[in-house]
Image: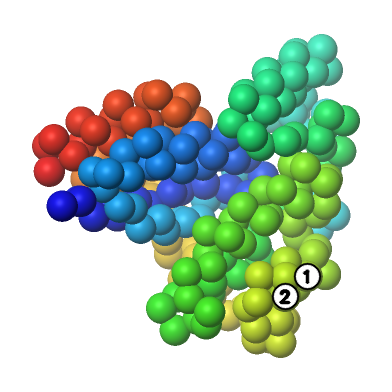
Amino acid sequence: MTTALKIDFVSDVSCPWCAIGLAALEQALARIADEATAELHFQPFELNPQMPPGGQDITEHLTEKYGSTPAQQADAREAIRRRGAELGFIFNEAGRDRIYNTFDAHRLLHWAGLPSTRPAGLQPALKRALFRAYFGQGESPESHQLLLRLVGELGLDEARAGEILASDEYAAEVRARERLYTDAGIHSVPAVIVNERYLISGGQPVEVFEQSLRQILRGE
């Protein structure tokens, strides 16, 4: 008999370590498939909630936010690219040109995760598609054109998604979820919360996720 796990993956579409963390987590879950099944729920977190339309040059942004130099940023990009390649996630070698606001992407992810949304169960696929579009192809996650294209490619209701993007629908729900996790002490992502009790922080290696999940299974 397998144990059912509920996993809340708190992350941002513009976070490279979140893309790495998701790939590693999913590989760890495959390793323990004989012991557990997992239901993944993607929860919103915005690294740059005040980012204006059109975004900001990535080098300028990282220098302002972290005080890093272009050389340090290049080293970090290469480390991220290597980690991604090990997991089968391909980062664009040229890196990202800009950082963007991701709030609308989170609204659509929230909608895709609702039990009433059909086809059901496509929230993880939409999350992966957003990561690939931004980090792999350098497309803007604030672009409604991109968001609608991805929704349509996955078989979700593109017209309904357009209605959501043209309104404030699900804005309050997304902000409430963001507050829920920041109030709980989560200020960096990815944050992986298992069964609403156990926290695994960061884009960990597959082996670390696997070991942590096995420990949780023994505890459960």
Residue at 46% over, 56% down: 43
The alpha-carbon separation of the residues under discs 2 and 1 comes to 5 Å
Tell me the crowding category of disc 1: few under 14, some 14 to 19, or many 20 or more residues within 10 angstroms, Cα based: few
User: Could one spot residue 165 in this view of the protein?
Assistant: no
Residue at 67% over, 56% down: 129
Residue at 87% over, 30% down: 94
In the rendered image, the vertical position of residue 107 relative to residue 164, given as above or below: above
Circle 2 SS class: helix
The tag on residue 152 is: 2
Residue 142: x and y in percent read: 76, 60
In the rendered image, the vertical position of residue 73 relative to residue 29, given as above or below: above
Residue at 72% over, 70% down: 153
In the rendered image, the vertical position of residue 32 relative to residue 171, given as above or below: above
Amino acid type, label 2: Gly
Residue 76: x and y in percent read: 70, 19
Mark 2 and mark 1 residues within 8 Å of each other at the beta carbon: yes
Please identify the quadrant where the C terminus is shown.
top left
Amino acid type, label 1: Arg
* Residue position for label 1: 149
